Amino acid sequence: MAELRRLLLSPKQLVTLLMLAVINLALFSGYCRNVQEEQNTYVKIQTKSLRTLVQKAGEVQQEEEQAYVTNGYYEYLDYVQAQSVQQSLLGKLSAKGSFVTRNLEKTAKDYEKLKGIQLTAGENTGIRAVMNYRITDFLLLIAPLLLVLELSTEADSAIGALTRTTKRGRVPLCCMRLLSLVILSAAAVLLLYGGNILYAAKTFGDPGLQRAIQSVPDFKYCTVRITVGGYYAAAALMKIAAVTAVTLTFWILFTRFYSFLSWLISVPLLALQYILSTAVVPTSAFNHLKFINVFTALESDVFFTQYCNLNWFGHPSGILTDIVAAMILLLVILTVLTVILIGLLRPVRAGQQLEAVKDRIVCRLSRFMPVHSMFGAEGWKLLLAERALLTAAVCAVFGVMLFRDIHFYQQTVDVQKFYTKYSGEITQDKIDKAQKMLLGEEDKLDHDSQSFRLCMANGGSEDMKNMIRMHIQQDWMYMERYEEFLDMMTTTREAAEKGGFKPYLVNDNSYRIMITENASERRCCMLLLLFLIFSFYAAGAYDNRWDTRLLLRSTRNGRARMLTAQTAWISILTALAVTAIHGIYLLRLHREVGFTYPEAMMQNLQMFRGTSIRITLGGCIALLMVQRFLAAMVISAVIMTISRCSRTPQRALLISLIVFVLPTALAETGLSVMQRFDLVRFLSCCKSVIN
Amino acid sequence: MPNKLEIKHLTKLYGDFRALDDVSFTLEPGVTGLLGANGAGKSTLMKLMTDYMKRTSGDILWNGTDILKMGYKWRELVGYTPQLQGLYEDFSARRFLYYMGTLKGMKRKDIKEQTEQMLEAVNLSDAAHKKIGTFSGGMRQRVLLASSMLGRPQVLILDEPTAGLDPEERIRIRNDIAELARDRIVLLATHVVSDIACIAQNVLLMRKGKVIAFDTPAGMLADAEGKIGEFSGTYDEIRALQKEYPNGEIAQYRDGFVLRVAEDPLPEGCRPVRDAITLEDVCHLYLKGERAYG
């Protein structure tokens, strides 16, 4: 028990878990906001536009969900049964007792069990959000793996030798540590995955835990009779098993092999598992490798959203049964191996020869090691020794995942058409043309009104009346819109005459998105904030960690020059991160929506008319980027100061996370008191451009 | 004219506690051994000399100029080995020395040349590519020593440089320091009194933040004459006597046990030691009751 307490209740462990939960919540809440925005935008298009197709498509989607629950799913069940009968006739052609025949029989039998299942419509968005959000799966591995690395380091130290000389220092101690790892894995899953479930429920509404999981269209192919709550519990259990399996594998490798060999085995092993889980097609002959896979188990949803039987020597077996059996077997084997290899046997490590080979290579290479300048040396320290480069690589991966989710919504086609025709320098000719267009719309309205009156008088059909009514509504809307545009053109021209700049009609959609705080922008800022914290938390504390500062300060360049070099590197990395993250965001925005007429003065846009600075729209983008860089620099400087005052990098990281991420995560959850401490808002600088 | 480092009325207060109290002495080329019990103020003195911390009052003058006014020019002249092994454990020994060379403002060519020389001198050439975190205490100490000697500084401030070294290494390093000290100032704090006895031209004894003696080893030994004596007797008799003289050191000779004491005047019945007085005895005499030096 003492070991359990030492490993699990240490402040370091608790804070690590808490911080992981905070980071996860901050990222997940951003994702949920994105989902919410997508939903809202979709609804807006439905209500504002009178285009029947769009309106109907939305209605169809809603109706489809309802129809699926009331009728569609049951039809699907019947369809499966009918298909199985049909295919069994074909199956008779194939050899009796073959996998194909057995698979057809099993499929029919599996779906047979679902007859009479009661589906209930409910809020499915939250369930989908939890299911589709993948970053949590990777975050789950962090705390247990950190503990494993700590345990393997401890095994090499004097304390490792000391504990093994005591009565309960071998197998009992190993069992306790194993239990700690299982508990830690479970705690991580409950805290992070459970946090996601709760947050999604709060954001999107009660998912209806008692509903059959088949009520969610994504789980149409699930053949297990399980409720939504049951699915959550089963997924959590599967995640715990997967995290424990990865953790135990790492523990065995890192305790029985030298570090180089351990990394050489573990990293490719994990990478291979991940590649197999994502790259193998579910229907391929090698689908065993996809489904009997630790990463697929970590994702866990596949086993509930897909129906597939694996071929085991001609016998079909459901993927869910297979993964459960495989995980139990794997965990039993790993547990026995752990007890024998770590608890029972003497701590001898393998791979010394490989280590010696590596040493020889490194020794030869180290003679050609470049001697850096002060700037180069500090860069080397920050990028490699303090692992900012690794952070950048991880952030790049997260960035790719993030940008995949980002979508910008276009204006309706008529608005786009108007801007294509009339945007650019506002001339009298253009105004006249727009006026003509308005008159045309007025004529159209008269014509349609006349048609409606005629239709009424002649007793036209209801359909005809409805169609003309809709045309009239559309005419009204277009007329109003063209009046607005015309008004915009004339007021812009007046403002330009007054302000002394060239009048331009510019489509403001991209500029509006750029300066509006939206979920995608917030997620970019959150990524930037995490990058800054994880890259710079050691800049300063690294020198305090082994009391090196005392020595450094006794040297010629160990004070101001060193600080200057560090600051220069931090500025460069901050600038690169701001340019990369916000730059890619703006480029995507430009590609999908388009920044038009960057040479026009920003006062041409209604939203910037009150702004006192006189710059072009292109300048406005540049100004925003500069502001964002400065905001990021302020945060980098504070992180660096925290780091310089901290005894160890870990402490600096912890303080930085508490200072920056915690309030932001709380603000993200909607806590109004925390809004003013929202660092993401500070980093995005959206509001400052207008002011 | 030889270089001169003058410490004048140096005082350092930590709140009300006087870590250094009006310390004055002058260092000239050669090794000066610094001895004192734990908390005597040795490390504080060294930190002030490297301008790591702010002094409360007094002056530290290099050839007549205050080191604070000299700024980085003073640090260019100093090589320092701190008591705590402040090394980057993630760095290899070679990388660390390159880094220190850069911090010392050396030229790239000199850094490469001198790093290999120093690694050779401290017998670390074979392990130079390995991470310092994997080094033993002795190896780390040697890395620190090598780093302090990089750039051939005029003043070497060594805080227990031979701690953790095996006897053979210690002798080698000691000789290297003696060799280096021929044309530079070396201030060497150590708890191994024999190191100082072998190579120091001067010895500085400190107690509770004050300098209590500053002389050559020969002068100190002469001064201690008549104040070092021995009691002879059986083991039980000697044990009983030790209760009276707790700082006395028990030794076993061929003809029995003796208790060696350093007292002024010597107590009755105590036979004065004439020829075999050591620097260790001098320390016993001056630093009575304060066990650990260095």
Image: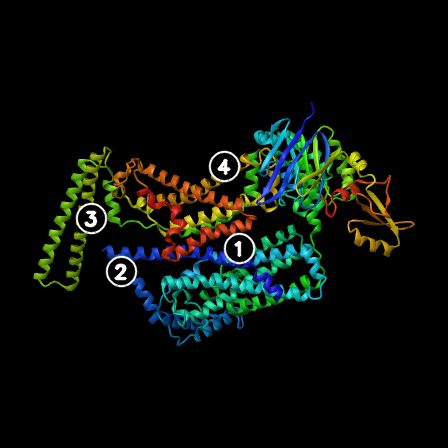
Depth check, mark 4 against mark 2: the one in front is 4
First in sequence, mark 4 or 2: give its number.
2
The mark found on residue A56 in the picture is 2
Q: Amino acid at mark 4?
A: Ala
Pointer 4 and pointer 3 on the same chain: yes
The mark found on residue A481 in the picture is 3
SS for callout 4: helix
Farthest right residue? B255
The mark found on residue A507 in the picture is none
- Camera-side residue of B247 and A549: B247
Label 1 lies in what chain? A
Question: Which quadrant would residue B166 be assigned to in this image?
Answer: top right
Q: Amino acid at mark 3?
A: Arg
Q: Tell me if I can see residue A236 in this picture.
A: yes
Using residue A508 as the reference point, say whether residue B215 is left or right of it.
right
Neighbourhood count class around disc 1 (C-alpha, 10 Å): few under 14, some 14–19, many 20 upward: some
Residue A429 drawn at (x, y percent): 17, 36
First in sequence, mark 2 or 1: give its number.
2
What residue is pinned by disc 1? A275
Residue B194 drawn at (x, y percent): 78, 40
Q: Amino acid at mark 1?
A: Ile
What residue is pinned by disc 4? A568
- Camera-side residue of A594 and B125: B125
Residue A556 drawn at (x, y percent): 59, 33
Gap in Å between the C-alphas at discs 2 and 1? 41 Å
Question: Does A345 appear above or below B58?
Answer: below
Question: Which quadrant would residue A29 be assigned to in this image?
Answer: bottom left
Residue A511 drawn at (x, y percent): 31, 44
Quarter of the figure with the N terminus of chain B: top right
